[in-house]
Amino acid sequence: MRLSMKLCCHLRRLLLCCCGLIVACLVLPAQALTLELREAQAAVTVQGQTTRETVSLPYHWDRHHAGLAGEATFEVPFELAEAPTVPFGLYLPRLGNAYEIWLNGALLQQNGDLQHDNGPDFAKAPRHIEISPGLLRTHNLFRVHIRADVGRRGGLAPLTLGPDKEVYPLYLHDYRWRSTGSFIVVIVSLLIGVGAMALWATQVDVTAPGWPRRDPLYLYAGVAELCWTVSVSDAIVEHPPISWPWWGMVALMAVTVWVGSMILFCAEVASWSQLRAVSWLRRWLALLLVASVAAGTTSLVYGYPLAMTLLYAVLGLTSLIFVSLFIWKAARGASLPHQMVALVLLWNTLVGLRDLYVFRISQAYGGNTLLRYSSVLFGLTLGFIVITRFRAASAQARDLNANLAARVAQKEQELEQTYQRVEQLAREQERTAERTRILRDMHDGVGAHISTAIRQLESGRASHAEVLQTLRDSLDQLKLSIDAMNLPPGDITALLANLRYRLEPRFKASDIELQWDVDLLAPLARLDDKTMRQLQFMVFEALSNVLQHAHANQLRIELRATLQGGAQLRVIDNGCGFETERVKRRGLSSLRERAAAIGADLLISSVPGYTVVEIVLN
């Protein structure tokens, strides 16, 4: 049994070894076809002097020739076991700023002007070239000619050559991280920056005294994101909008403003804006912005890169001190936004130190910075802060709305009660006014006539017919006062019809012929209840004067519409007449007073056989 078990173990090991050999045989030849070429013969020309040397790639121009422009030709020989029969690919992480690539005397690719400095920069993106099998032999030579500008990270990275299906994924991975990823960061940062600036422009505190105040947190965030957009776009823009080195100075100033704005943004998050130290910090950051102009000019125009290195060092030291203090305060207990920003700062600081080592200390050439991606966390944190503030403002608005709704309901209840009291008081006033009117009408009309009848009886000089006439007038006045309560406002035709109904029997009893010439008029809007009663008394007074004094046998009542949309009312009799200026009757005085009260024109003319009382309402 033991022997069989040992035999099975040996067979299993043998089978595994055979499988490993088969896999090795299949994989190793394919791996051997992919070459990384790092040795080259270089002819470097700087300030008219050409030197030849053997170099090891990568060749970082700014490290070898700081502050100087020039050109170089690299010859990279390599051998293949046999001429390939499948397409090969050449992958270069970085080269330029302008370049030509030759293979065995055939030009593979060219970008930029090799004769003139400070043109477009083609060292931004990785390069991939597909090589047809006919161009490759067993003994081969790459010749790469580059032109490098001052401070633009020119040079040549190692060349990776192999079957295109193996090389292209390497290029594609690098391109996505360096170019596509940078483009996405640019779009995201631009949107966040524009959104933050829109919030800063629209969120105005109008309750503060003096000028309208805006939240500087959104301003600093917006400026930082827009400057970061400019800085990151430098990594993908091969044709800058302005010539080099001025575009380089713009990118350097954008980085400086980004650092300063992010520091001030963090100070606003921590509510440190009113501290005296922060006011000094603002002055220091403004001084660094001015220094960035000087450092950019010194490094990129005059060729002294140490100035830019010192500027980056001061910026980094300032940021490190502030970040350390910010994180320390967050760790001792702070608001949630403060703690979140502290975590983002810590992560970005670590990523920034990694990028500093890769791009400033190590000999790596090419690669991709990670800070541009980690900085997006600031935008996400800003979004969280905006949402937090919006939720707090929404909760406050809901509380205010609830309080306001409660106060409005209370005020509506109070108004309803007040309205009911006012309505009740109005009804009482209306009843009082109606009683007052009735009493006044009774006093001026019925009461006056009864008083006259009493005086007539007491004097003993009045005849029975005169007393009877006075009492009849009193009764008619009483009936008309009651009728006045139901008169339609403005309807003069109805008013005259009512008078005719009440007085026509008396005219017949007095042998007075009543002629009725009345047009049917639309109600006049300006004649209210009070005006209609005054008009009724005027007409009654005119008719009463005819019955008592005119000794007429014919009475004519006319009603016509005026051109101004009013009414003309005429009472005409053929009585004895009177002198209008000399006769002083109480009835005539009453007519004039009532006409003035309602704004009517009163015309009285009289000659024997023809007396007219004309009332014009416009």
Image (cartoon, rainbow, N blue to C red):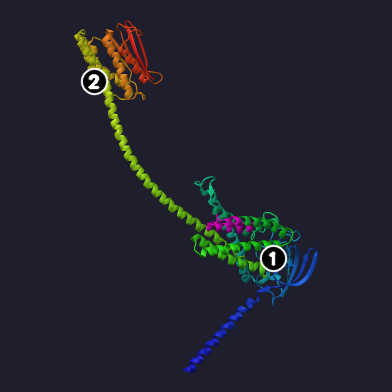
In percent of width and height, residue 49 lies at 80, 65
Up the image or down, 2 lies above or below 231; here it is below
Q: Which residue is mark 2?
A: 479
Q: Nearer the viewer, residue 123 or 264?
A: 264
Whether residue 90 is visible to the viewer of this picture, yes or no, is no
For the C terminus, give its image quadrant.
top left
Q: Mark 2 and mark 1: span between their CA atoms?
A: 118 Å
Q: Nearer the viewer, residue 564 or 280?
A: 280
* Left or right placement of residue 464 versus residue 169 in this view: left
In percent of width and height, residue 514 lies at 27, 12
In percent of width and height, residue 258 lies at 61, 58
Up the image or down, 571 lies above or below 140; here it is above
Amino acid type, callout 2: Lys
Element carrying mark 2: helix
Which of the 4 quarters of the picture holds residue 288? bottom right
Q: Which residue is mark 1?
A: 95
Dot 1: few (<14), some (14–19), or many (≥20) neighbours within 10 Å? many
Dot 2: few (<14), some (14–19), or many (≥20) neighbours within 10 Å? some
* Left or right placement of residue 468 versus residue 63 in this view: left
* Left or right placement of residue 244 versus residue 491 in this view: right
Secondary structure mostly seen in magenta is helix
Q: Nearer the viewer, residue 92 or 489?
A: 489
Which of the 4 quarters of the picture holds residue 550? top left
Give whichever of discs 2 and 1 has the lower sequence position. Answer: 1
Q: Nearer the viewer, residue 298 or 563?
A: 298
User: Is residue 535 in the magenta section?
Assistant: no
- Residue 515 numbered mark, or none: none
Amino acid type, callout 1: Leu
| Residue depicted at x 43% and y 52% | 396
The segment highlighted magenta reads 253-281
